[in-house]
Structure formats: structure tokens, C-alpha cells
Image: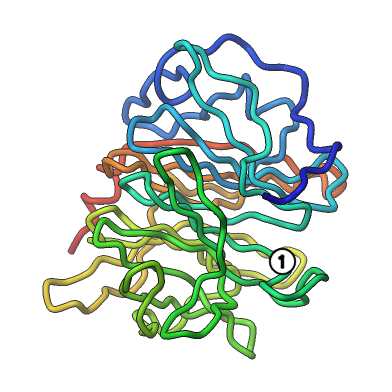
Amino acid sequence: MATQSNRLQWPDHMPELLGPWLGQQLPAGEAMEFCPAVLGHGVQVAGITFDPSGEEALLAWNTPDGESAHLMRTAMGDGCWIKPEPAPFNSTEIDNDVCMAPDGKRVVWRSWRPLPGNMKPEDDVSLWAVDRTPGGWGEPFPVECAGRRQPAVYPGIGLSGALYFSVRTSDGSCVVARARRDGTQYNAREIIIPETSPGGDLCVAPDESFLVITVYSGETGARRGNLHVSFQHEDGEWTPLQDLGPAINSELTEYCPTISADGKWLFFCRLDRTDPHAPIRRTYWISTDVIRRLRP
């Protein structure tokens, strides 16, 4: 595995947390800030994903110096959550946009780490994956679709094993693609949503009935994002993107959504840029019932 940087030290605060979901009380109707005792205090987390039990979590963590991002892992040990530490498959390069498959057996993320045979970090991002083995997490490998490397962002995984992700186009927008799993790799990608907006943060419901996507508006530098949904029809077509509304969206930026393996909970980040020199990121969660009620 890649050598971990000595500076990847989680802040000292780590309260005693007991039970699944970092010991948090389930949200009741409204979006609730998720575990501020750990993810508050200026901790810059941009995405969290859980295993099916809710007893292991991976975090996309922006380092305090703002120069890098890494994958951190925390889990229950003897009933109490341990302090986050670098995931076994984290590298010394930028790793983020992490998602765990609903069965907990595969993790996919984006990385600038060297591709096999290279020694230096890549100039372009690639999707990487790792599979769980009887002895723990295996060796990470670059994702390929029909034998081609995927320079993509924001992956999501359905129960069928299909991989969903955003691909940035030359004009700065994004398209959403899907690739069916074929063994350890994937078949050729297909475009399912032809254009969203710059950004492309997404997640997919485990049953693949809907996608949640961040749509950005406004000029560069003052751009704001909100979460939207697209539902999949029985014929395989996807509905136009629909704003998730005030139950989730605010005057700030909502982004980096993920959905729990049982499909019940939506996690997302909210970014406050009121002070451009010290942006504040908070993590929230809410029942996916607020999404399902929007299905046309």
C-alpha cells in the first residue's frame, strides 16, 4: 500500500461515540447536522460513505493546509468509534470523491496517484477501485470501461454493480454516464444524462431508481450549488433534473451527496463561503422519503 504522510493526523477531538452512524440519533423529518462533535470544529470533510451496517465509514478529508485531500477511515471498535485515520488504500496524492458499494464489498474514488508503470502523480484524474477480501481491503486498481481508463469524477455504485459517474466536457459542463460491471472491471460507458452543469457531484440510490446531482448556477467565483434529482423510468429513461427544494437546499451550496446502503438516508455537505478565507463545510443527513415523494 502507499506510504501515508506523517501530516495526515486527524484533529485531536474524538468524543466517545457508541452505536451505528457514529452514534447519532436518526433525523426526524428535517435535515440534521451529522455528528458535529467530530465533523465540526473546522474539519473540512467533503463526503462520507458507510458500509451496510453503518459501523464503518470513509471520509473525503481536505487537509488543514488546504493543499490536499485524502481518504480517512473510522469504524466501531468494541462498540466505540475510533479516531479517523488514513484508509489502507489512501495515497500520498489527492484522493477524494469516495463511495462504497451497497454491499460494502467495493470502494471507488478519484485520484491523481500514478497509474501502473508510472512514477509521478498524474496530470489528469482517474477513477480507482479496491475490493474487500477475507483479510481486509485488497490492492487498489484503476477503473477501466471496455479497457479504457476513466478520467471521471464523483462515482456512485448501484446494487447491480453498475458504476455511475460524471465526465467533464470541453465546455466545462458535465455528462452523467453509467457502465455495467463486467468481472472486476466495466463495460463501455453510456451517457444517461447528457448535460448537467460544472461540478457533477452525484450519488445513486442503491436500487438505481434515482440519482442525486449537484447543479451549479451563477458566475465563476460566486457559483452556488443545490441538489437535484433525476428518476429512472421503467423504460430506462431518466427524468429532467428537479430541485430537491427547501427541505434540503438553502442559500448556501449543497454538494457531495451519498446514500446509505439501505437507501434510507441521504448524506450531503453544505458549504458556507461567507468568509472566503475560511469556508465552513458541514455534513447533514435526512430521510430519502423527501426525495421519493417528488417522483412524477
Q: Residue at x 75, y 32 (%)?
A: 42
Query: Seen in the image, is 118 located left or right of residue 192?
Result: right
Q: Is residue 143 above or below residue 7?
A: below
Helix, strand or loop for disc 1: loop
Q: Is residue 14 above or below residue 28?
A: above
Q: Residue at x 76, y 73 (%)?
A: 122
Query: Seen in the image, is 56 located left or right of residue 222?
Result: left
Q: Nearer the viewer, residue 19 or 256?
A: 19
Q: Quadrant of the C terminus?
A: bottom left
Residue 135: x percent and y percent?
46, 38
Q: Is residue 59 above or below residue 150?
A: above
Query: Seen in the image, is 95 located left or right of residue 205?
Result: right
Q: Residue furthest bottom?
A: 170
Q: Nearer the viewer, residue 174 or 87?
A: 87
Question: Residue 188 appears in which quarter of the rendering?
Answer: bottom left
Q: Residue at x 68, y 72 (%)?
A: 115
Q: How is the image coloured?
A: rainbow
The residue carrying pointer 1 sits among few (fewer than 14), some (14 to 19) or many (20 or more) residues within 10 Å by Cα, namely many
Amino acid type indicated by mark 1: Trp
Q: How many marks?
A: 1
Question: Residue 278 appears in which quarter of the rendering?
Answer: top right
Residue 203: x percent and y percent?
42, 57
Q: Residue at x 26, y 75 (%)?
A: 238
Q: Residue furthest left?
A: 234
Residue 137: x percent and y percent?
50, 44
**Disc 1 designates what residue?**
112
